[in-house]
Image: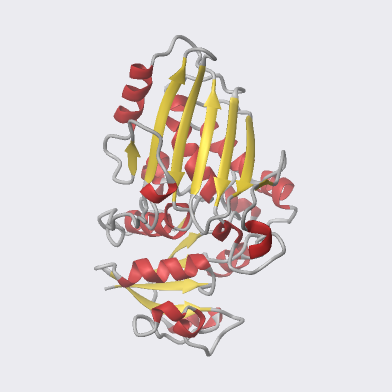
Amino acid sequence: MIKSAIVGATGYTGSELVSILLRHPEVEISLITSNSRAGEKFSDIHPQFLGFCDLELQKADVIDDYDIDVCILALPHRVSMDFVKKWKDKPFKIIDLSGDFRLSNAKTYEAWYNKEHVIPEMVPTVPYGLPEINRENIKGAKVVANPGCYPTTSILGLAPLFQAGKVEKDSIVIDAKSGTTGAGVKASATTHFSNVNDNFKAYGLKTHRHTVEIEENLGSLNGGEVMVQFTPHLLPVDRGILATSYARPTGKMTNKELMDLYKNYYKDEPYVRVRESAPELKFVRGTNMCDIYPTYDERTNRIIVLSVIDNLIKGAAGQAVQNMNIMLGLKETLGLEVSPIKP
């Protein structure tokens, strides 16, 4: 069995990682860490795992005492890079779920995250872990940067258009909505029930850090700079992301041409479904799927693309396991073969 460690397992993503790896036929969980809750059982923090995973949480520095093949870092932005710096020469592979290695260079990272990078020379060398556009670079990589949840939804929704050069690069508007788990497990005034329930709000206007992540990766598909207007919103639901993306075509477009483009682009992808009608959050809940519906509006001469994911699975833990499978040469779908939860 392949031995894994989950570093920073007290949040929602850590919980989902444990849930997925418990059913993975080729991987076992050897170590779960939390520096703030060391000594407690994992099932004390996440009571739903009582009897399924009662491992004692350890401090991260005990990893040297374990024979680990892969380490998944479920740590905050600006913190994770310290652990990568410390462990980058260790024999195990690393999947980082923070934003510390998602961008093309340290200068861009520092501008958007307001933090000096501790290993700036490493940033350009870490593959972006979106398998549908970067699978070959993920294979055999030592460290992979797991994408953000909003960028996963948005990039997958628009990738076929950019790959084929079918849209004006400065015409992109992305209107995205996420459930509250995207804000993490720690409570705040923003995620307090009385503020979320019966409410709907936009945030991060013009400045959200996922904007540059989307721009860089869409631009990489056809070698040019991309300008994106990205606005995230907070939905009064626990999980899921729905992104509605708008773009102007570079030439004539029909619905059939658009649908054929998407179906051909994603025909061999196990976790993308191109739908004939608008998807819903519950169509993908609890799975690693991304459902996409592209359509063309002749009246406005705009392409409209709806894309949905579960932000905790394809937007975080599930994609990390998908990347892990690719990095280790395993079947890509192992541990992720589940159907959606609805209702």
Compared to residue 220, the image places residue 299 above or below, namely above
Q: Residue at x 46, y 30 (%)?
A: 305
**In the rendered image of this protein, does residue 186 appear above or below residue 293?**
below
Residue 277 lies in quadrant: top left
Residue sitting at the far top: 252
Q: Is residue 331 left or right of residue 326?
A: left
Q: Quadrant of residue 27?
A: bottom left
Does residue 22 sit above or below 243 in this rendering? below
Residue 90 visible in rendering:
no
Residue 169: image location, x then y, percent: 57, 23
**Total residue callouts:** 0
Residue depicted at 48% across the width and 78% down the height: 46
- Which of the pair 84/248 is nearer the observer? 248
**Residue 186 rendering spot, x and y as whole percentages:** 63, 69
Residue lying furthest front in this view?
198
Spot occupied by residue 283 in the image (x, y as percentages of width and height): 36, 47
Quadrant containing the C terminus in the rendered view? bottom left
Residue drawn at x 34%, y 81% as measured from the top left: 52
Task: Report the quarter where the N terminus lies.
Answer: bottom left
Residue 37, position as x, y percentages in the image? 58, 84
Instruction: Give the camera-side residue of 56 and 339.
Output: 339
Residue 288 in sight from this viewpoint: yes
Q: Residue furthest bottom?
A: 39
Task: Looking at the picture, tell me which residue is in the foreground, 299 or 14.
Answer: 299
Image position of 47 with respect to 117: above or below: below
